[in-house]
Image (cartoon, helix red, strand yellow):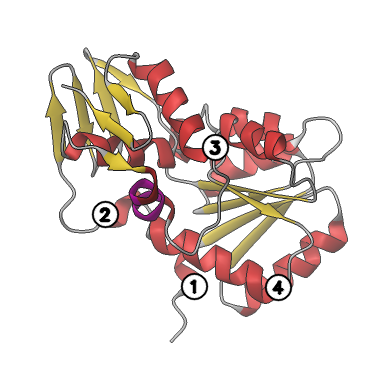
């Protein structure tokens, strides 16, 4: 039985032949597929369908993929949506810029359909079918002035709600579950991104830096040569 129909995927690319090719392969797997050819339409459509996954091309005329991603991340309704950049640019600095913009993964073109489908399955497996289907064991974590509600997917600091993209939320949840415990970089990669997902070495650094920018520097400590921990 194919369970892929539980997932909505939004494809964003200014090249219609790429949309048709990727869309065809995704629909064969049973995914519910939507497409947009520019950033503005993608933002509007994402707000309407609340996709589980957005495959976003970087090099688009007008509003490029980075700008589109940044705008999407301003919409709290899309906090649970995974955004993966699909692009021919594979340089480290380009990947870092993608994560800075709020992306969760970076897939380099050209890519074989079977490999792309495998990457998508791995991403969606970690996301679950959406915030309304929260797995058992989700809970509220409180430490001093920060509260995480894993079921409602919210972070509150000093009475103010802070909007976090999915990977930043998962990273903060992991660190806050055991304050003082040092998580190694390998452990964070496996727990947050999964063994099947290949991301750049700077990915964790970018997400940690963004969390510190939103929560303050004192909460997340770097243990040189090892990893990171949440400081009470």
Residue mark closest to the camera, 3 vs 2: 3
The mark that comes first in sequence, 3 or 2, is 2
* Mark 4–mark 3 CB contact (< 8 Å): no
- The residue that label 3 is drawn on is 202
Give me the C-alpha separation between circle 3 and circle 2: 29 Å
Q: Quadrant of the N terminus?
A: bottom left
- The residue that label 1 is drawn on is 4
Q: Is residue 129 visible?
A: no
Residue mark closest to the camera, 4 vs 3: 3
The residue closer to the viewer here, 195 or 42, is 195
Q: Is residue 207 visible?
A: yes
How dense is the environment of label 3, judged by Cα within 10 Å: few (below 14), some, or many (20 and up)? few
How dense is the environment of label 4, judged by Cα within 10 Å: few (below 14), some, or many (20 and up)? few
* Figure quadrant of residue 60: top right
The mark that comes first in sequence, 3 or 1, is 1
The mark that comes first in sequence, 1 or 2, is 1
Q: Quadrant of the C terminus?
A: top left
Q: Is residue 63 above or below residue 216?
A: below
Give me the C-alpha separation between circle 1 and circle 2: 17 Å
Label for residue 134? 2
Mark 4 falls on what kind of element?
helix
Residue mark closest to the camera, 3 vs 1: 3
Segment colored magenta = 187-192
* Mark 1–mark 2 CB contact (< 8 Å): no
| Residue 70 in the image, given as x and y percentages of width and height | 60, 29
Residue depicted at 42% across the width and 29% down the height = 208
| Residue 205 in the image, given as x and y percentages of width and height | 48, 32
Residue mark closest to the camera, 2 vs 4: 4
Mark 3 falls on what kind of element?
loop
Give me the C-alpha separation between circle 4 and circle 3: 27 Å
């Amino acid at each position: 039985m194919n369970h892929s129909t539980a997932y909505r995927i939004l494809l964003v690319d200014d090249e219609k032949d790429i949309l048709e090719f990727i869309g065809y392969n995704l629909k064969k797997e049973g995914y519910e597929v939507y497409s947009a050819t520019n950033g503005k339409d993608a933002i509007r459509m994402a707000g309407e369908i609340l996709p589980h996954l957005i495959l976003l091309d970087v090099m688009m005329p007008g509003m490029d993929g980075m700008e589109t991603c940044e705008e999407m991340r301003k919409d709290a309704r899309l906090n649970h949506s995974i955004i993966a950049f699909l692009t021919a640019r594979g340089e480290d600095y380009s990947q870092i810029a993608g994560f800075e913009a709020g992306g969760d993964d970076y897939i380099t073109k050209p890519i074989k359909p079977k490999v792309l489908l495998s990457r998508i399955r791995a991403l969606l497996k970690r996301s679950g079918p959406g915030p309304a289907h929260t797995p058992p064991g989700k809970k509220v974590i409180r430490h001093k002035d920060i509260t995480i509600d894993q079921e409602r997917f919210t972070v509150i600091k000093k009475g103010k709600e802070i909007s976090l993209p999915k990977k930043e939320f998962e990273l903060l949840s992991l660190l806050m579950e055991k304050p003082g415990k040092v998580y190694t970089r390998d452990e964070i990669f496996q727990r947050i991104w999964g063994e099947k997902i290949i991301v750049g070495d700077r990915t964790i650094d970018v997400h940690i830096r963004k969390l510190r920018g939103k929560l303050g520097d004192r909460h997340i400590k770097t243990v040189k040569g090892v990893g990171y921990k949440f400081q009470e």
